[in-house]
C-alpha cells in the first residue's frame, strides 16, 4: 500500500507532467472503485492549476473552483503516457490533457477512490474533515503531539499511526521513526518521556522527508506503463530486517505483530 512518501512522489510527478494543462476528455471504464466513480466530464475544457496532497489524498485543483480528490487505495497507480499508448490491464480511468499527455489510472484491487469538491471547501469534504495535522507542515506541533500522547495508554506505535494524532505515518515509517527515536514500539504512549517525544516528533519528519527525497529519483519511470514510484527499501533501518544485525549495536533485530501488522525493532536500542 502506498504510504505518504509514495503519494507525495506521485503528487510531484503529476505536478510535473500535467499541471497547467487543459483537460480535453475523460474516459472511465469502471463505474465503481471503492465507491462509485463520479462523472468527471463537466471538467473538460478546464485547466489543472495545482496538484496538492493532504494525508494520502491527492487534490487536483482545476480552475472555476473544481477539485478532484483521489486516493490510490491499496494498489492505485498513475502513469502519464502518450494518447496512442494501449490501455494496460486494470486501467479504469483515462484523462487526456492538451499537449499529448494521457493520464492513466490503474488499480488492480480497486480500493482507490475518486471524489469531487469545490476548491474553496475541500477541507470540509467528509474524507478529509477529520484528519489530524500534516507531519511536514507547521500544523504538526510538538506541544499538541506531546499532549495527544499523554492522553493515550496504548502502544506508542498504534498512537503514531492514528490519523487524528498525525496523518500519513503508516506501518513502515512508524517502525522506522520509533527506531530512530530509540523508543520501544510497545511502550505505552503516555509513558514516553518528554525528551523522547521531542526525538520522535523529529524522527517522524526526518524519515518521511528522507523517503520523499529518495523517491524523487524514481519519477522518471512514471512515463512507462511498468514504471511507478516504489518503496525506497534501501533507506530502511529496521523495516523488513528481522534477524539481521542492528546498524547501531549489531544485535539481531526482532519482529512482532501489533494490531495484525508487523513491527520491526531493536530490543537493545529501543526502550
Ligand atoms: Zn540496536
Image: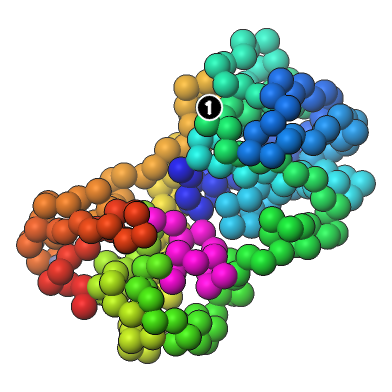
What's the coloring here? rainbow
Which image quarter holds the C terminus?
A: bottom left
Q: Which residue is nearer to you in this view: 56 or 101?
A: 56
Name the residue located 11 percent from the left edge and 52 percent from the top edge.
243
Name the residue located 53 percent from the left edge and 27 percent from the top edge.
108
Magenta residues, start to end: 159-171
Q: Position of residue 2 (x, y in %)?
A: 48, 44
Q: Position of residue 132 (x, y in %)?
A: 60, 69
Q: Which residue is nearer to you in this view: 81 or 268?
A: 268
Residue 89 visible, this angle: yes
Residue wearing tag 1: 108
- 216 shown above or below 203: above
Q: Is residue 50 left or right of residue 41?
A: left
Examine the structure image and report whether residue 141 is included in the region drawn in magenta.
no
- 227 shown above or below 53: above
Q: Position of residue 80 (x, y in %)?
A: 62, 26
* Mark 1 within 8 Å of ligand 1, using the beta carbon: no
Q: Is residue 166 left or right of residue 258?
A: right
Looking at the image, the residue that sits furthest to the front is 260
Q: Quadrant of ligand 1?
A: bottom left
- 119 shown above or below 44: below
- 243 shown above or below 34: below
Asked which quadrant contains residue 124, the reply is bottom right
Amino acid at each position: 500500500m502506498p504510504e505518504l512518501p509514495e503519494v507525495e512522489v506521485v503528487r510531484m510527478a503529476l505536478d510535473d507532467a500535467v499541471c497547467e494543462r487543459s483537460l480535453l476528455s475523460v474516459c472511465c471504464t469502471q463505474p465503481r472503485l471503492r465507491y462509485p466513480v463520479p462523472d468527471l466530464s463537466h471538467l473538460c475544457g478546464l485547466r489543472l492549476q495545482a496538484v496538492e496532497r493532504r494525508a494520502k489524498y491527492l487534490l487536483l485543483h482545476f480552475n472555476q473552483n473544481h477539485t478532484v480528490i483521489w486516493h490510490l487505495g491499496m494498489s492505485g497507480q498513475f502513469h502519464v503516457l502518450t494518447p496512442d499508448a494501449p490501455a494496460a490491464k486494470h486501467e479504469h480511468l483515462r484523462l487526456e490533457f492538451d499537449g499529448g499527455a494521457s493520464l492513466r489510472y490503474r488499480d488492480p484491487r480497486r480500493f482507490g477512490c475518486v471524489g469531487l469538491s469545490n476548491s474553496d471547501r475541500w477541507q470540509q469534504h467528509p474524507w478529509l474533515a477529520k484528519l489530524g495535522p500534516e507531519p511536514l507542515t507547521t500544523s504538526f506541533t510538538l506541544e499538541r503531539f506531546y499532549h495527544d500522547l499523554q492522553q493515550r495508554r496504548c502502544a506508542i506505535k498504534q498512537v503514531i499511526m492514528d490519523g487524528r494524532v498525525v496523518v500519513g505515518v503508516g506501518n513502515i515509517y512508524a517502525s522506522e521513526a520509533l527506531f530512530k527515536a530509540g523508543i520501544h514500539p510497545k511502550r505505552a504512549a503516555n509513558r514516553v518521556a518528554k525528551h523522547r517525544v521531542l526525538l520522535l516528533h523529529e524522527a517522524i519528519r526526518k524519515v518521511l522527508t528522507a523517503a520523499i527525497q529518495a523517491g524523487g529519483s524514481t519519477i522518471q519511470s512514471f512515463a512507462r506503463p511498468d514504471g511507478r514510484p516504489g518503496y525506497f527499501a534501501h533507506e530502511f533501518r529496521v523495516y523488513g530486517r528481522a534477524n539481521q544485525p542492528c546498524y547501531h549495536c549489531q544485535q539481531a533485530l526482532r519482529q512482532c505483530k501489533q494490531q495484525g501488522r508487523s513491527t520491526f525493532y531493536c530490543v537493545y536500542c529501543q526502550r
